[in-house]
Image (tube, coloured by chain):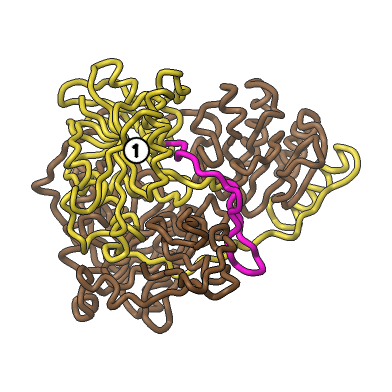
Amino acid sequence: MPIVVIQEKCIGCEECKNSCPYDAIVMQDGKAFINEYCQLCNACLSACPEGAIVKTEVKESGAQIADTKEELEKYQGVWVFAEQRKGKPAPVSYELLGAGKGLAKELETELSAVLLGADEAVAEELIKWGADRVYLCSDAALEKFNDEAYAEMLSRLIKEHKPAIVLAGATPVGRSFIPRVAARLRTGLTADCTSLEIDKDTKNLLQIRPAFGGNIMATILCPNHRPQMATVRPRVMKKGEYDPARTGNIIHIKADNLTLRTKVVETVEEVSAIMVNLHEADVIVAGGRGVGNAEGFRLLEELAVVMGGAVGASRAAVDEDWIPYSHQVGQTGKTVCPKIYIACGISGAVQHLVGMQSSDIIIAINKNPEAPIFDVATYGIVGDLFEILPMLTKKIKEAKGL
Amino acid sequence: MKIVVCIKQVPDTSEVRINPETNTLIREGVPSIVNPFDLNALEAALQIREKVGGRVTVLTMGPPQAETALREAISLGADEAVLLTDRAFAGSDTWATSYTLAMAIRKIEADIIFCGKQAIDGDTAQVGPETAEFLNIPHVAYVKKIEEVKDGYARVQRLMDEGYDIVESSIPVLFTVVKELNKPRLPSLKGKMAAKKAVIRKMGMADIGADEGCLGLKGSPTQVKNIFAPKVKSDRRMFEGSAEEQVNALIDEMRKIKCL
């Protein structure tokens, strides 16, 4: 292990054990011992009062499987996987182009997009949004998302053209098939990044992501393998600039010899007056136990409609069957980060907070002034939601001139 | 039907915090639990076994103390448990973890493999699909309903952002599941007895015939550079007065920050 405890120095105080997020330190005969859960996060190094924990340099870490420096340098350019839904780019695709453009500029290289199952007009749009090149496959077999087909197409393109960086949206699509690509290409993949930077010295991609339900942030590197791959959380990155005069190359590719062992036989959309896609909503009005019953969620829906948002819920409300699971926010539901999150009658159990605490603005409405939800709130209203919500809805309607 | 369920012992992450002054983690007294989604995965496996017969094997990779998680799975009804443990596995990222699991699954043999959609400590959701790739079998992620399972064929519902897809697959296949799929059962008395007596099968690097260069830290393409505390908001504002006064104050604020 590259992080080791110098047994002679260890006094058995257990400070390191308590600092370890991975349960990787155990006490044996009164001394600390680092086991295979260690993720090399370095947390224990600074925790040890005796300086008994040290990081030893592994000789050429990963040398057996790493690519050589020359091999790594063959990989150039920034790619984004431009996800489409029903032939239109998913919102996250524009955000990836925005983020990708910034990285490409810093690396003085080009930005390319990979578009599967859409037509040339969409590819033109991606160019206007910042892509220098679009690899387009318009084959009907790719219109609907299929893990194996998408993984095969993207892997083939990467092998042929060798980009240095590949980004995709951390959506159900990206998070499902991109891991297959990384596994196949024997390279690293970082999930659900919220920030991407270039290391000034090494030019490596610094991939920053929340872990432990957003309680800590980690910077991840993929130094010895290419491409460096990451999925990026929707709604975090800024869209690029739209330039209707921009031009670029569209390279048509074919989808032949695909092995498909799964097939989407039907796509069922949940039709509703309000948005159900919590990941992409600017505003989420969420309810908890305080909403009282399924009927109570009507008040939340009304507010969500005037604010153009979606309705979320805490686990308590979902467990009571007041609203379907697809609306659940929190540890066992969805992680969301809208511009505005309005928590109504949600006390704020940590399991809920980890799913929404990175929202830009949090408005909490709760009867109990001591409710933990107020600890993460930007604005707090103490009162009865049945009185407050209709009033708020009415006043927002007026303010918006609806 | 031979079913393997991959589970992970995780710290109850909702209780993990970082000390902003020292930038170290505070996890004193944080209990270890079976990753919640993995319990849904196990429940799905048990239900299939009850319908079509077969054998359910739970598999985890971790240090010796991860045995606790496996015994819990046996108490819920799993037939056997395998602990993948070896110093060579230390420091594995998702790539190396998936490779290791896949090598073990090849030895155990499986028609269907179930995983939770993600583990609550890392939240990556990558190990399931990567494991399927290493096994060269298809996978369906975010499964919310299993409609049919029979010889060589499965049909499931996959949760998407705006609804769900109905997906058919050949078998063998790997599914990652969401909580909506089912409600995990509680351990029976008989199960608890079985858990106490169960012999946990241990496998190491040599048992699964793995390539050492693909294991643990050496086999992991990604590295954790550092960890740090997220920025905390300190600008909370509590409104005062009657309901109407508070609502008016909120509307004013929303105008000020141009949310209206």
User: Position of A349 compared to B157: left or right?
Assistant: right
- Whether B208 is drawn above or below A268: the answer is below
Where's residue A73, x and y in %?
A: 23, 78
The chain letter for the residue carrying disc 1 is B
Q: Is residue A304 left or right of residue A386?
A: left
Q: Write down the quadrant of residue B118 in the picture.
A: top left
> Residue placed farthest to the bottom in the image?
A201
Indicate the secondary structure of the residue bearing disc 1. Answer: strand
Residue kind at label 1, given as amino acid type: Cys
**In the image shown, does A55 or A339 lie closer to the viewer?**
A55
* Residue A289 percent location from the top left of the image: 67, 29
User: Is residue B16 covered in magenta?
Assistant: yes
Provide the residue span drawn in magenta.
Answer: B14-37
Measured from the top left, where is residue A28 in percent x and y? 47, 57
Residue B170 at least partly seen? yes
Task: Give the quarter of the image for residue A317.
Answer: top right
- Exactly how many numbered labels are in the figure? 1
Q: Where is residue B177 in the image (x, y as percent from the top left)?
A: 37, 34
Q: In this view, does A299 lie above or below A248?
A: above
Query: Can you name the residue that lies furthest to the right here?
Result: B241
Q: The brown chain is which one?
A: A
Decide: is B105 above or below A218: above
